[in-house]
Image (spheres, rainbow, N blue to C red):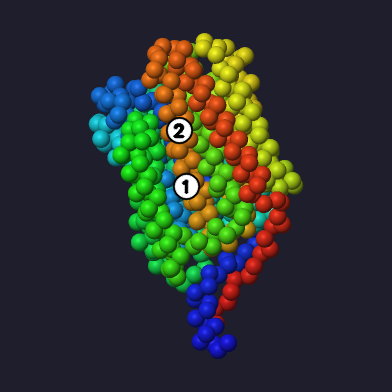
Amino acid sequence: MSPVQAKSLSSTVPRMETIASPNPRRWKALALLAVADFVVVLDATIVNIALPSIGRDLHASNSELSWVISAYILAFGGLLMLGGRLADLFGRRKLFIVGLIMFGLASLAGGLSTSIAELIAFRALQGAGAAALAPAARSIVTILFEEGPERSKALGIWAAVAGSGSVVGLILGGVLTSSLGWQWVLFVNVPVVLIAAALAPGLIDESRAQSTDRTIDWTGAILVTGGLVAALYALVRASDAGWGSVQTVGLLALGGGLLALFVWTESRLASPLVPLRIFRLHQVRGANIAMVLMAGAMVGLFFILTLYQQELEDYSALKAGLAQLPLGLVLIAVAGAAGPFTERVGARRVLVTGLVIFTAGVAWLSRIPLHGSYLADVLGPSLLIAVGLGLGFVALTIASTAGVDGNDAGLAGALINTTQQIGGATGLAVIASVAASYTHTAHGPAAINDGFQAALIVAAGIAAVGVLIAATVLPGRSRPRPATAAVAESA
């Protein structure tokens, strides 16, 4: 090969990042990154319990209040793939800090909102900030810790902290709303993320993909963002518009068409937004499919459980939040210990075990009677659900990065976050529709409870499909990918 050919080849083939000596500050950096991601996950649920107070204060209808949640989900889920790729190309620490600042300022402005329109706009800006910082944070973790036992331990800690965000959001939302007012479910983010942004330069080294080509595939960005937003919007609004409505069917068709066009476009570009090679990794592909199902069942069951406790059991917002405390504590404990265990026995075994336990817990919860007892009917299945989720989150987090080239770390982080959002939105739409269908022909607490039970059976079925996927699609235990030196550029 001539020197000219060699140079041409080196500029087009993605190069592996050189693995340097471990960062001595990596465990402190992990704590910072996990806390930042915890806030992102927390914000998906902390506002839920505050919605009635927001409605009264800002004179908002139920339809307008739903957009306080939807705006965050749509911006976050729609922009994740772009955020992950920008982190790989232009600097993961840089995008992490930008995302933190955007998230913090949007939280401050949202808490100061004087109208529902302002709040919805700032929630969308929060989602955009989350789409920048979340994949950047996850990819930095995979760069800080080499694949193997240490990364598994780190990702176990990461999953324990981040995975508890949804549950803690319910608890903290109730406490803050009851004691200080709904504005504080947003204000609480501000000092956390701004302190994290100030500490990040001293704890995290900059990293980016080792490529000379920094061009942005704007066509791909528009197609994937448009496709995801259309699909997520259709799913989020399906329970109101109806699954067979022109809106739902049309938007799902539009989203599917844009995403199909996106895949075709990416396969023809030299520098795509999403290099399709990442989908050739069986671990990554299997982990993302399983995440869709686990997230769908999880988000749906938390939605139903919260409604059951507040609508049928007359729990206050604070009591409903505190009722999730045992689940949150067990989830954190299990996930924190699951990293080294997953490294020893393999992600597939841990994931299958976790999903089986999770499915059993949801199935048990589906038997909740009208005016049941928390200790007899809710606590036991909640603890099983916590164990299953703790094992599942760690296994999926580890599997989603296994064998991924350092150049694609941000992309892998964005991908697993995106499938989690899609799964959550899909599961919530399906499960909420099942619950609502029981009140179309009958009314009263008994009909509502029948709907909740049927919805939880569907959630258990979704989780059971996840068990089959994890057992058949996810490969068995694989050896860590050996470190590969960067391809040197020819002179």
Query: Quick one: label 1, few (<14), some, or many (20+) residues within 10 Å?
Result: many
- Residue type pointed to by label 1: Thr
| Residue drawn at the location 61% of the way across and 44% of the way down | 469
Mark 2 to mark 1: distance in Å?
Answer: 18 Å
What element does badge 2 sit on? Answer: helix
In-front residue for pair 129/426:
426
| Residue drawn at the location 59% of the way across and 27% of the way down | 362
Q: Position of residue 273 (x, y in %)?
A: 43, 61
Residue bearing mark 2: 430
Residue bearing mark 1: 418
Side of 400 where 103 appears, left or right: left
| Residue drawn at the location 25% of the way across and 35% of the way down | 117
| Residue drawn at the location 38% of the way across and 25% of the way down | 50
Q: Residue furthest bottom?
A: 2
In-front residue for pair 52/19:
52
Mark 2 touching mark 1, by CB under 8 A?
A: no
The N terminus, quarter of image: bottom right
What element does badge 1 sit on? Answer: helix
Residue 75 badge: none
Q: Residue furthest right?
A: 344
Q: Position of residue 109 (x, y in %)?
A: 31, 38
User: Can residue 1 be seen?
Assistant: yes
- Residue type pointed to by label 2: Val
Could you say which quadrant of the image residue 235 lies in?
A: top left
In-front residue for pair 16/140:
16
Could you say which quadrant of the image residue 459 lies in?
A: top right
User: Can residue 153 be seen?
Assistant: no
Query: Quick one: label 2, few (<14), some, or many (20+) residues within 10 Å?
Result: many
* Position of 280 relative to 63 (above/below): below
Q: Position of residue 471 (x, y in %)?
A: 66, 44
